[in-house]
Image (cartoon, rainbow, N blue to C red):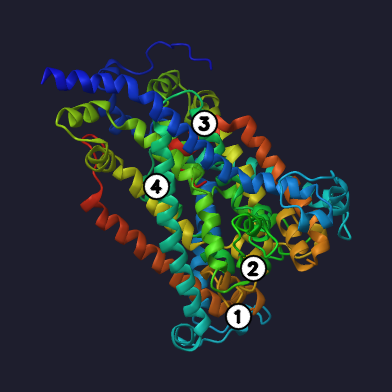
Amino acid sequence: MALTTAPGRTGPTRSARPHASRRGAGRDRHGEGLAGYVFLSPWLIGLMGVTAIPMLLSLYLSFTNYDILTPLSEVQWVGLANYERMFTADPSYWHAVRVTLTFALVAVPLKLAAALGVALLLNRAWRGVGLFRGLFYLPSLLGGSVALAIVWVNMFNRDGAFNSFLAIFGIEGLPWVNDPEWALETLMLLAIWQFGAPMVIFLAGLKQVPSELYEAASVDGAGRVSQFWHVTLPMLSPVIFFNLVLETINGFQGFTAAFVLSNGTGGPVDSTLMYTLKLYISGFTDLEMGYASAMAWVFLIVIALITTVFFSTGRFWVHYSDGER
Amino acid sequence: MVAVTSTARRQGVRRPGGRQALRLVVLVVIVAVVLYPLLWMVGTSVKSQQEIVSNIGLLPQRFTPGNYTEGWSNFDLSFGRFFLNSAMVSLLTVVGNAVSCLLAAYAFARLRFRLRGIWFAVMIGTLLLPGHVLIVPQYILFRSLGLVGGDWPYLPLLIPQFLATEAFFVFLMVQFMRGIPRELDEAAKIDGASPYGTFRHVILPLSRPALVTTAIFSFIWTWNDFFRQLVFLSNLEDYTVPVALTLFIDSTGQSAVGPMFAMSVLSLLPVFLFFLAFQRMLVEGINTSGLKG
């Protein structure tokens, strides 16, 4: 970094009112406008080529019967047929919707509850907190992999570790992953097991709560439980909100573990047919890419709607202390 | 009144010891539950086939490293090939993300240009865009360009990474750069440095921590990624580790469990080593930006 102070190329007015000159006349004297686009160009090309154009293409394809085998030029416009089929003539589509919603509605709150609970336990600073935090975080790094999904499926097999554990108490377990009633629950457990990432974010949030608030509350006679409800939760609500949005959107996209458990079929009896897996099967196994595109667009719209709902209801329950936002 | 506060204080001094111990016990139990699947995975990977069914303990009665050699050469190609493929894809992704996201972040964080606000809003919008939505049209586009299953089938996986499409990293770097004192840019500008010179001599050297965080996360996510690799790789010799692992599921008679676990352990090893080396940084990384885990 060679930053020698060269004498006055810029006049005294500039140094006296740096903000005004930066916004005003001196705005583009260093070619910033052009440089901005030079630096932004890879991102812009990516936005167009990898995101925007594919999105529009997929919107178009969702009104066609495109399969990958016929050339794009011979594609047939089928109007709303794909959407009609999805909503009225494909029971497994609704099944996928139900599986995905169940998964997100059960696994996400439980995962966040686990994350918050453990974060509260860890919050009081003492030696070893770093070690615990690291160990709890480890599953979040490993849990999304195929390898861990394989291990998980075998753990809940008939001969798996979970049944061996139950056997200690004389309970005879089920082949959980092959049971349509339980297969999805094992996937939920896998998601909850990865509570470390939101926990780390909760911990950071807890550190931000001013200790004066707790002191004030305890002077007012608030017990630990009441402090939790009236100090911790409101002060933590931005972080809870953040985790909730992120985990819900991630939850809707669960794919790997469901693929591994069912060997790519969504079985047993469609019980693990997550939305993304249904989309994959339609697009890349059945090669009905027009139909898969329609599914993708519905998915996108639903995710956008849910995000909107989160953000518009957020102001009723998310408490930003003054200064933030 | 005085009496009440003094007992409260006395309790406050005395009780944390007991409460702390209880807390510790609870935490140790939770750690045991959380780590059990990982330990069980490692234990099972060195058990013989009979023991996998009969021995429910974590440790094998007889240490059987044979699963590793067997798994390594279980398919027509050695597993080493899949590791090399994965390593190449992951390392190139790291390079692509680091370079392209840094450039974009510099533009967003420091330069003034037309429509900057709009582009920034678009970038934030793509943060929450699910990748699964784009997979079908991307596949069609890359296929029409002859890149799927082509001479070098990794291009569809890598091209997006060189075009800063991982908005998380752009956002992380923008946040980081906003913390770099503007006086340094101003000083460079006064010295007559162009935006390029400022980038090269001020922002680039000071952005190293953000680059390291990006590199680590991008390596781990790509190493673990399955969906895109499953879609874009179709020949055995091009397979990466996650795709190759699914071949074990197809062929599962009970006999394959040991080798399958052995290869699973090996496949997680790089991520685990990264975790050991960069634990603190990873944890802080998700704090500063709220990255997905």
Residue drawn where x is 33% and y is 31% of the image: A208
Q: Are marks 1 and 4 in contact (CB under 8 Å)?
A: no
Residues at marks 1 and 4, common chain? no
Give the amino acid at mark 1: Glu
Q: Is residue B10 left or right of residue A263?
A: left
User: In whole angstroms, how far apart are the C-alphas of marks 2 and 1?
Assistant: 34 Å
Up the image or down, B212 lies above or below A144; here it is above
Q: At 80% across and 64% down in the image, what residue appears? A: B254
Residue sitting nearer the eye, A242 or B39 = B39
Work out how far the residue at label 3 is from the one at label 1, CA to CA, in angstroms. Answer: 48 Å
Quadrant assignment, res A235? top left
Circle 1 sits in a helix, a strand or a loop, which is it? loop
Q: Which residue is mark 1?
A: A288
The answer to whether A321 appears left or right of B94 in the picture is: left
Pinpoint the chain carrying mark 3: B
Q: Are marks 4 and 3 on the same chain?
A: yes
Q: Is B100 drawn above or below residue B251 in the view shown?
A: above
Same chain for labels 3 and 1? Say yes or no: no
Amino acid type at mark 2: Pro
**Image mark 2: chain:** A
Mark 3–mark 2 Cα distance, whole angstroms, equals 62 Å
Residue A274 screen position, x and y as percent = 53, 69
Picture residue at 41% right of the left edge, 36% below the top: A121
Which residue in the protein does label 2 denote? Answer: A175
Residue, disc 3: B196
